[in-house]
Image (tube, rainbow, N blue to C red):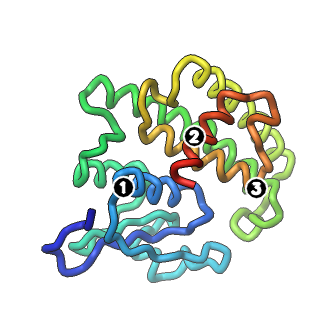
Amino acid sequence: MAYSPNTKDPMRLYTSPRAPNPRRVTLFMAAKGITGVELVDVDLNAGAHRSSEFLALNPMARVPVLVLDDGRALSETRAICTYLEGLYPEPNLMGVDATERAFIEMADRRIELHLMLQTAQCVRHSHPGLAVLEQPQFPQFGAAQGDKMRETARWLDGELARQPWVAGERFTIADITAFCTLEFARGLMRFRPGAEGMGHLQAWRDRIAAQYG
């Protein structure tokens, strides 16, 4: 599914492949079969997100950023996904009516504000490779956030014991947010749910990984 045959320029997504938020957008696009969006890699370790060119797109110096075909820049992961959902309503990932949209957003925000934030804080304050992005680092705070992340993961394991997907009975944006978070934790925290007694969470992760890698 190409973006549009009538636009002069394709949309451009400024991304960083190893960061969880840009991966949320690229996985969202993959789940919808969206193609034709140019991917522009932003080297975070080299400080490219602080360059004047990038700050002109997003003064918050964060990826991802989606540059529309009219040249406007849209940042914040959820906003980008909402825009893409509007352009490509099927397969639906954010809810078909007011009730479902509200419950999917609740699940997604719980993951984003707890599991994802705790993972990010743990990694940014405890991993030496992230020191270039987080100064000063507070290792004790990072370790505490790692413990809180595991508490949230155990809660999610319980949710997945009674329902197949994070927001209920079908795959949604909430699963994308949770999966990208756990893959980030898998790489930098060496977090394996199954090895820590969270079998439902591990099985859910493996199902998504088998389809999207």
Left or right of 66? Residue 118 is: right
Question: What residue did someone put label 2 on?
Answer: 207
Please tell me how crowded label 2 is: few (under 14), some (14-19), or many (20+) other residues with Cα within 10 Å: few
User: Callout 1: helix, strand or loop?
Assistant: helix
Of the numbered discs 3 and 1, the one sitting upstream in the chain is: 1
Expressed as whole percent of the image width and height from the top left, the position of residue 181 reads 61, 47
Q: Which residue is mark 3?
A: 188
Name the element at disc 2.
helix
Three-letter amino acid code at disc 3? Leu
**Residues at circles 3 and 2 in contact by the CB criterion of under 8 Å:** no
Residues at marks 2 and 1, CA–CA distance in whole angstroms: 25 Å
Tell me which residue sits at (71%, 37%) in the image: 149
Residue placed furthest toward the right? 140
Q: Secondary structure at mark 3?
A: helix
Mark 3 Cα-neighbour bin, 10 Å: few <14, some 14–19, many ≥20 = some
At horizontal 51% and vertical 60% (from top left) the residue drawn is 22
User: In the rendered image of this protein, does residue 143 appear above or below residue 129?
Assistant: above
Q: Position of residue 7 (x, y in %)?
A: 17, 75
**CB atoms of marks 2 and 1 within 8 Å:** no
Q: Position of residue 89 (x, y in %)?
A: 24, 46
The span from disc 3 to disc 2 (Cα, nearest Å) is 21 Å
Which tag is nearer the camera, tag 3 or tag 1?
3
> Where does label 1 land, which residue?
80
Measured in 3D between alpha carbons, the distance from the residue under mark 3 to the one under mark 1, in whole angstroms, is 26 Å
